[in-house]
Structure formats: C-alpha cells, structure tokens
Image (tube, helix red, strand yellow):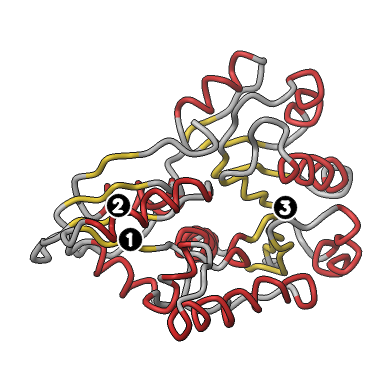
Amino acid sequence: MSKKTYFVVNDTRYDNHHGGWRVMANLHLGMERRGWQCSGSLPVSAQVHHLKKHSKAISESNLILVNGEGSLHHNSRNAMRLFDVMNQLRKQRPVVLLNALWQDNDPERWHPLLSGLSAVYTRDRRSQSQLETIGINAAYAPDLTFYNYPDYSGSQQSRYLITDSVLKKWDETAYTICQRDPECDFRTLLTRRPKFSRGSRDWGRQLKFSLYPYLFEHFGSHVPPRYKVVAKATNNSEQFLQSLAAYRGVCAARYHALCFAIQQQVPMLFVSSNSH
C-alpha cells in the first residue's frame, strides 16, 4: 500500500503557547493513528509566497490539512492570509479546513473557496451555525485539545488563576488585580522560551522573551504584563496543565485556557476576547 501523507497549514506551534502546542500534537497523533505521515507544515501567519519553500513537501502530500484555530474572524489579516493560501493549494490537492473558528467574514468572498474544499470542520457550534447560514455544510468537532489530554483533576485545589489574553488591555487589568489580591495568580499561556522559530521573522519575539523578563526582574522596568510572568512559565505542557488543575477557579481570557479548565474540571469564568 502506498504511503498516505498530509501537509499542515497554519502550524500554531510557532506561536509558542500551550494551546497551539497541544492542538498540533493532537492533530499529528490522530493522523498517525490512522496511518498517515506528515510531510511538512506551513507556520502560523505565513503568506502565500512562503509556499514556494514547501513545494516539495506539498507535492508529496495526498491531503492538505488547514488548522483554522482562532484565525478566521472579521476578515482579519491572518484570516485573509489563510484565504490566499487555501485558494492556491486547492488547485493542487484536496484541502480540509478543520479545528476552525468562523465569525463575521465576507460571505460573498469566502463562499466560492469554502464550497470547493473537501470538508470543513468547526471547533464550536456557533461557528458551524454561521457557516450554515451562508450555505456551507460544515461539521462540528470539538477543539483538538480535547482529542487527547492528561487528567489532573484530582489535584488539591487552592488559590485562583487569571490568564493572559490576546488583548493587551486585559493583561494590564488582570495583572493589576493579581498584584492587589494575594489569593490570585496571573499566568500566561505563552511558553518560557520560544521553541519553534521561523528564523529571521521571529527575531523580535525572541528578543522580547529574552530581554523583557530580565529588565523587569532586575531593574523593575515597565514591560507588558505577560512578559513579567514569562520567567515563571514553563515549556512543559504536562507541567502547565498539572499546575492549572491545582487552582480552585480560573478566570480564562484565552480560548484554550477555557478548554484546559473544562478538561481539568476546574470552575471557570470566561472573559470575552477578540472573537465569540
């Protein structure tokens, strides 16, 4: 039997946070269990011209899997990047959009593309409903973090946790609250250090991860709140989830923090972000 291979678009490991890491780990695990092998991946935020670098891996693939994750909303910059990439790739291989958020994009622009894909799966019912209203037959499959996860829900629980957000204004508010309340910890879903790099495109991020925590800890310099706590972050996802399960409650301001709290059976309050 010939080898079954797939290529991944929107590899969110390169965002270097625990949500993206677990999504991609579970995607590869699920495909491996079904006898598929990965030929390569296109990092998150890549544009259509970056496909040239991966032409060999794409040509060797039987299937293109596009990780929609939190990108497809309000015709955002990342949404339109994925639009262009999918539009190009569907001319070459079968394309499946999965694990996708969908919210308030231009239906006239998107319908021809989505109707030409081999399958569309949303990670939430509301996204599925919005796609159905524009005539796209989308299926629902829970976020990929639910495919496989450890259970630490029996941990002894104490204190409360507030997570960071994609919205910087929320980070400022949450960090201030935690500074005032000794029962609350502010934590970021970002990893301790970037593990996945897109080369020179990520030099700015790598500099922030190295410099900001140091400036804050040693000189008290003003830096964004998420970097004030990066020094206490971890690159070990199992360790991160185990620590999350030890809280009495979580104020979750990232989608994957919500997913993790559900999985670990930790009571949570969910704060709105940049999408439904």
CA–CA distance between discs 1 and 2?
9 Å
Of the numbered discs in the image, which one, if any, rests on residue 177? 2
Residue kind at label 3, given as amino acid type: Ile
Q: Secondary structure at mark 1?
A: strand
The answer to whether 129 is drawn above or below residue 61 in the figure is above
Residue kind at label 2, given as amino acid type: Ile
The answer to whether 162 is drawn above or below residue 112 in the figure is below
Of the numbered discs in the image, which one, if any, rests on residue 64? 3
Q: Secondary structure at mark 3?
A: strand
Residue kind at label 1, given as amino acid type: Phe
**Front-lying residue, 231 or 150:** 231
**Front-lying residue, 65 or 100:** 100
CA–CA distance between discs 2 and 3?
44 Å
Q: Position of residue 258 (x, y in %)?
A: 35, 46
Q: Position of residue 124 (x, y in %)?
A: 46, 33
Q: Are marks 3 and 1 in contact (CB under 8 Å)?
A: no
In the rendered image, which quarter is residue 195 located in? bottom right
Mark 3 surroundings: few (<14), some (14-19) or many (≥20) residues within 10 A: many
Residue at image position (26%, 62%) is 185
Q: Are marks 2 and 3 in contact (CB under 8 Å)?
A: no
Mark 1 surroundings: few (<14), some (14-19) or many (≥20) residues within 10 A: many
Query: In the picture, which quadrant includes the N terminus?
Result: bottom right
Of the numbered discs in the image, which one, if any, rests on residue 186? 1
Of badges 3 and 1, nearer the viewer stands 1
Q: Position of residue 230 (x, y in %)?
A: 45, 73
Q: Are marks 1 and 2 in contact (CB under 8 Å)?
A: yes
